Amino acid sequence: MDFILKPWPWYVSGPLITLTMLILVLFGKTFGMSSNLRTFCAIGGAGKYADFFKFDWKAQRWNLTVVLGAIIGGFIAVHFLSDGSPIQLNPETVSDLNSLGFENVGASLLPSEIYSWDSILTLKGISILTIAGFLVGFGTRYAGGCTSGHAITGLSNLQLPSLIAVVGFFIGGIIMTYFLIPLIF
Amino acid sequence: MKFLKFLFVGIFFGIVLVKSEAVSWYRIFEMFKFQSFHMYGIIGSAVVLGALSLWLIRRLNVKSTEGQTIQLPEKEKNYTANIIGGAIFGLGWALAGACPGPMYILLGTGVFSMLIVIAAATLGTFVYGLLKGKLPH
């Protein structure tokens, strides 16, 4: 049982993500997490402002159920299936982050420099989370999907638009990581 | 009851992404710095196995549990939107260290500040819906 409590290697995790996609496909659905953001908008009455949100959101209840499950899965994984092992990052990554002022790198899933309440309750902290979230939500719908819809499902289904979107993901990600994060922190 | 199976798929997905560390901000930073094979191994193996499986599903004409022929939606060929939207998404992904799936999962791990990110992402989607007709696609 010990191996379950340790972090899982890529060659276990990757195929299990494929399995997640395949189960949804076999249920006659598709794997796409960002579609739920559009559903949230529709539930909130966004259809009054744009036709993009005029659709039968009740037909998306299955996907909202997946979201609910994912939240529960996150809870189960950290409380019952983890031994608290630190993340085995490349030492170069750790030293890069140390030099940007990040401490305890890899001790938990997320840096307290971004996600702790102390950080959020500053103008800079709340701006970081708000801008980051906004870019994800705007970008994913503009691109037509996120990591699950484009990178996993779209690439598996040999879709050229997905390949282009994934190239876009990396252009944005590299600009943020190499140029903007060093300016922000 | 018909939703119960989807609840279990979600639970499974949440557990896998936490145990793979794909929900970690640090792993995303490391990936974009090309300093580890970990995330590339996860995505790469998922895609290769996914492509093989979808090929096999078509080849064997496997039906869904609803009895339908399995037909994945074709992605719209809006290449300008794919690349620009993708880059905007990438900026946010690298800063938040989380894409939409991990946002929900991390909320479950007890990171309640993720609610701010989810709310902002919903707002971003709303603004896209308002501007859709004016943006190049």
Image (cartoon, rainbow, N blue to C red):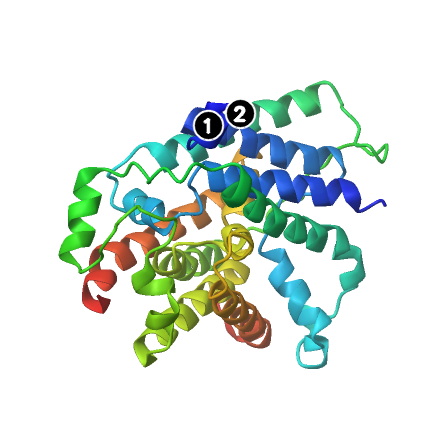
Quick check: do tags 1 and 2 share a chain? yes
User: What's under tag 1, amino acid-wise?
Assistant: Ser
Q: Are marks 1 and 2 in contact (CB under 8 Å)?
A: yes
Please name the residue shown 62% across and 36% down the image: A21
Could you say where residue A32 lies in the image, as x and y percent from the top left? 61, 49
Q: Is residue A67 left or right of residue B127?
A: right
Please name the residue shown 49% across and 47% down the image: A147
Residue at numbered disc 2: B49
Does residue B137 appear anywhere in the picture?
A: no
Please name the residue shown 67% across and 40% down the image: B9
Judging from the image, mark 1 belongs to the subunit labelled: B
Decide which of A145, B16 is in the foreground and name it: B16
SS type, badge 1? helix
Q: Quadrant of the N terminus of chain B?
A: top right
Could you say where residue A160 lies in the image, as x and y percent from the top left? 50, 41
- Residue A141 — which label? none
Residue at numbered disc 1: B45
Q: Which of the 4 image quadrants contains residue A51? A: bottom right
Could you say where residue A75 lies in the image, as x and y percent from the top left? 56, 48
User: What's under tag 2, amino acid-wise?
Assistant: Leu
SS type, badge 2? helix
Could you say where residue A180 lies in the image, as x and y percent from the top left? 24, 63
Q: Residue furthest top?
A: B60
User: Is B41 situated above or below B97?
Assistant: above
Crowding near the residue tagged with mark 1, few <14, some 14–19, many ≥20 C-alpha atoms within 10 Å:
many
User: Is B6 situated above or below B89?
Assistant: above
Please name the residue shown 33% across and 40% down the image: A86
Does residue B129 appear anywhere in the picture?
A: yes
Q: Is residue A91 left or right of residue A160?
A: left
Judging from the image, mark 2 belongs to the subunit labelled: B
